[in-house]
Image: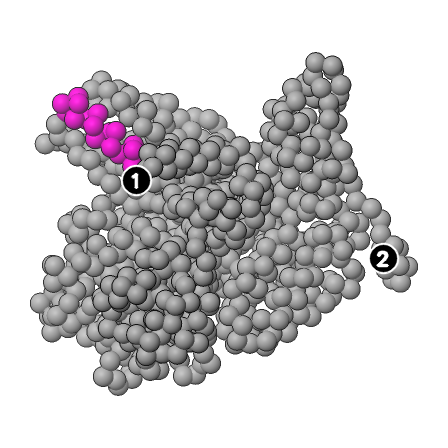
């Protein structure tokens, strides 16, 4: 990790105002923010670890455990809510066998919710690995997940 | 080249998610295969009618094709371009009359709008600066830099009467004036693109569709207040907007529109994009500043106001995307023109993200003062699935829900505030009889409770407490005294919170209590949800007369709560003890034979309350 972090930090000057961009870049590289990485950011920016941790935990985009290989995110915006987002969320939870903010045991899928992705005209919607799927019904959500799963499994098999 | 045609394919986030990238590629390939010349392909940002995406427009004919998938592209090229026959089956159809409408200008969704801020959205390629220049962007900035003093610019904006489009409606010129009057070695202008309201996507669409217009607005604002550095604070959830902004800034630098000596003048100005990290409170000015400085985005006490002491202690002005996108138009067309649109106190136009239970969802722009009824019924096409209008929510978590009685009020800052809601940054969510107003209040409190930064106790603890009460009511554990307790808490949170988040957080509860109190009472006294939304109060059963014994409900029930058999002709039944009220059976039944009810029970409290008075 040490080398990877040094490479990540190389485009920064190491000033306090770079804390959020540093956290973002590190998460982009590592997928999440391990404690060690946050300590290193603190040393690099000359700021105590407690402050780095305080900033990182304040913002919802930062996570401290690794995500699954596929990231499913159910939108809970107002437009999605009035068009049945909770039914979609429950259905996705059943399909994946996990609850919000959990990852499947095999590490293939993570499920999160988001306050709003701004695709309100297509409500209710979810994102899977940043692709937006809109105008969902529980059945359509199943189809989306099935498609993602089979594409992913094929990719895994090809990779081996 | 009188017959040169352009195929415009929308590539805003909405259309992309509906598949507009494969549509674009297929159209391009079909045109090439057919050996057609004189046809230009063009990608644009959001047309606003996201619900009908992917949207394809053929110019100069103005023919509007909706929901164009890859498989439709060969037909469009052959029929429209080779045979000269537009493809009627892909036209928009009026939701009421089912009439196909060919030209987008004739579609009521567009015909009833007046687009100033959104004028270019969907007509220019946001990734090609020349397209923006040809459409009139970057005319105002040189005009300002060559011939106007900072004071003259502020005076022009003041005369136009522009009010901040972020929600509160503070006069932009007054804000600029504060900052211009302060001496400092460095000042900042920040474009607030931290569009956090759930149910709103105006700013995202503008940034995706016409980023140069916002950049130009920032140059003019920077010049007016004396700032040489600009920041755009953009939500991390908007990757496409951030990408297009990055491209636009780079292109503007290459042309000398940003950087040293902008447009060959003596004024230097440059812009940095700051990616937000997901905190709703950062839409608040001082929290946003704290976030750019690298800390937790928590609001600070004011005064000092950011205009005097803002980012890194320097005078800073923060304007919303729409305010900044409006500025160049005011400079180009004059303050009097702008002041002549809208109402006396709220000039100009309002941009809304119209969503929820309306037939036509999307991005709209109307003159201030347009009645809600016109927005929802003429532009929005009324309620979907033949439902009835119940309420309209404006202003997101800070706003309120207004009932039918308010449909004829003109929409502007004052009228919405008087009704108990706010203009907000532009989210407008329409609700029908299936929306439970207690559940909506609970929904918003859940949001503000999560997003409260925790700095002040009334907001941090108060929203949590209100949420608990609302959850109890929704889950059938409500008590009569909860209703007065909610109002008490609402007042205390409003009074005692430091920033706008807390001060406005109770608004959804206050307005729903005021206009839909009977729904609260049905929950509390009768354990009944009139909108058939709150799960614990619902029961499902199969209407045996309508049931065709197809068994779809049983197959799809995740709780194995349904019994019955087609072959044996055993009627299908839903067992209350096993039912988890997920509603799957209702969704999948092809014959509408599953009935949802909220029978209710008369609680002891009601009797007691009734006896007491």
In this rendering, position of residue B606 left or right of residue B446: right
Residue B349: tell me if it is visible. no
Q: Is residue B447 above or below residue A157?
A: below
Quarter that holds the C terminus of chain B: bottom right
Please say whether residue B277 is one of the residues in the magenta stretch: no
Along the line of sight, which residue is nearer the eye, B312 or A56?
A: A56
Along the line of sight, which residue is nearer the eye, B31 or A159?
A: A159
Chain on which label 2 sits: B
- Residue that appears at 59% across and 60% down: B445
Q: Which mark is residue B10?
A: 1
In this rendering, position of residue B318 left or right of residue A87: left
Residues indicated by labels 1 and 2 sit on the same polypeptide chain: yes
Q: CA distance from mark 1 to mark 2?
A: 57 Å
Q: Which mark is residue B386?
A: none
In this rendering, position of residue B120 left or right of residue A57: left
Q: Secondary structure at mark 2?
A: helix
- Residue that appears at 89% across and 62% down: B612
Q: Which segment did they paint magenta? A: B21-36
Farthest-out residue, top: B567
Mark 2 = which residue?
A: B605
Q: Secondary structure at mark 1?
A: strand
Farthest-out residue, bottom: B183
**Is label 1 in contact with label 2 (beta carbons under 8 Å)?**
no
Q: Is residue B71 above or below residue A84?
A: above
Image position, residue B562 (x, y; %): 71, 29
């Amino acid at each position: 990790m040490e080398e990877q972090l040094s490479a990540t930090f190389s485009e920064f000057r190491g000033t306090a105002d770079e804390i959020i961009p540093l956290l973002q870049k590190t998460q982009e590289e590592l997928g999440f923010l391990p404690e060690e990485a946050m300590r290193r950011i603190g040393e690099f920016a000359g700021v105590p670890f407690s402050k780095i941790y305080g900033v990182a935990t304040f913002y919802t985009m930062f996570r401290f455990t690794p995500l699954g290989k596929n990231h499913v995110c159910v939108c809970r915006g107002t437009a999605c809510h009035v068009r049945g987002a909770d039914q979609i969320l429950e259905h996705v939870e059943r399909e994946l066998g996990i609850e919000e903010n959990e990852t499947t045991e095999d590490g293939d899928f993570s499920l999160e919710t988001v306050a709003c992705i701004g695709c309100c005209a297509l409500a209710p919607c979810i994102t899977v690995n940043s692709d937006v799927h809109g105008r969902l019904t529980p059945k359509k959500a199943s189809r989306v997940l099935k498609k993602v799963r089979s594409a992913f499994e094929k990719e895994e098999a090809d990779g081996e | 080249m009188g017959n040169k045609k352009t195929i415009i394919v929308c590539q805003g986030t909405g259309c992309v998610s509906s598949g507009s990238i494969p549509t674009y590629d297929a159209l391009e390939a079909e045109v090439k295969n057919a050996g057609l010349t004189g046809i230009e392909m063009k990608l644009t940002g959001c047309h606003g009618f996201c619900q009908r995406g992917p949207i394809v427009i053929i110019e100069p004919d103005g023919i509007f094709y909706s929901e164009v998938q890859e498989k439709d592209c060969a037909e469009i090229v052959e029929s429209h371009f080779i045979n000269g026959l537009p493809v009627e089956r892909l036209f928009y159809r009026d939701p009421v009359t089912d009439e196909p409408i060919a030209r987008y200008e004739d579609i009521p969704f567009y015909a009833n709008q007046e687009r100033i801020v959104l004028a270019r959205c969907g007509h220019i390629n946001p990734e090609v600066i020349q397209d923006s220049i040809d459409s009139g962007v970057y005319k105002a900035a040189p005009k300002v830099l060559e011939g106007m003093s900072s004071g003259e610019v502020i005076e022009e904006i003041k005369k136009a009467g522009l009010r901040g489009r972020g929600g509160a409606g503070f006069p932009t010129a007054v804000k600029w004036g504060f900052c211009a009057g302060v001496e400092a070695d460095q000042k900042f202008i920040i474009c607030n693109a931290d569009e956090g309201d759930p149910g709103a996507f105006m700013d995202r669409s503008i940034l995706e569709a016409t980023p140069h217009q916002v950049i130009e607005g920032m140059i003019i604002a920077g010049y007016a207040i004396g700032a040489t550095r600009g920041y755009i604070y953009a939500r991390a959830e908007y990757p496409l907007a951030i990408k297009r902004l990055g491209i636009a800034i780079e292109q503007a630098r290459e042309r000398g529109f940003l950087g040293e000596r902008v447009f060959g003048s003596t004024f230097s100005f440059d812009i940095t994009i700051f990616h937000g990290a997901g905190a709703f409170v950062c839409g608040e000015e001082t929290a946003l500043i704290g976030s750019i400085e690298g800390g937790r985005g928590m609001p600070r006490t004011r005064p000092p106001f950011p205009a005097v002491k803002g980012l890194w202690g320097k005078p800073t002005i923060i304007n919303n995307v729409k305010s900044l996108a409006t500025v160049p138009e005011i400079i180009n067309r004059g303050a009097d023109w702008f002041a002549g649109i809208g109402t006396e106190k709220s000039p100009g136009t309002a941009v809304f993200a119209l969503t929820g239970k309306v037939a036509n969802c999307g991005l709209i722009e109307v003159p201030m003062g347009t009645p809600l009824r016109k927005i929802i019924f003429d532009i929005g096409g009324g309620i979907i699935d033949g439902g009835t209008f119940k309420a309209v929510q404006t202003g997101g978590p800070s706003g309120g829900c207004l009932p039918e009685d308010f449909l004829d009020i003109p929409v502007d800052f004052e009228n919405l505030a008087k009704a108990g809601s706010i203009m907000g940054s532009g989210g407008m969510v329409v609700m029908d009889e299936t929306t439970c107003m207690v559940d909506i209040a609970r929904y918003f409190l859940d949001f503000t409770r999560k997003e409260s930064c925790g700095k002040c106790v009334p907001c941090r603890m108060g929203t949590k407490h209100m949420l608990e009460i609302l959850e109890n009511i929704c889950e059938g554990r409500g008590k009569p005294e909860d209703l007065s307790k909610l109002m008490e808490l609402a007042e205390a949170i409003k009074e005692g919170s430091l920033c706008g988040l807390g001060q406005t957080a109770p608004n959804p509860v206050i307005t729903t209590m005021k206009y839909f109190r009977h729904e609260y009472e049905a929950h509390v006294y009768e354990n009944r949800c009139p909108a058939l939304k709150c799960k614990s109060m619902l029961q499902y059963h199969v209407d045996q007369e309508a049931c065709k014994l197809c068994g779809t409900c049983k197959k799809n029930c995740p709780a194995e709560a349904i019994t019955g058999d087609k072959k044996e002709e055993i009627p299908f039944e839903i067992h209350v003890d096993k039912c988890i009220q997920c509603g799957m059976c209702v969704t999948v039944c092809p014959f509408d034979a599953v009935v949802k009810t909220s029978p209710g029970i008369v609680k002891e409290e009601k009797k007691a309350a009734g006896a007491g008075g």
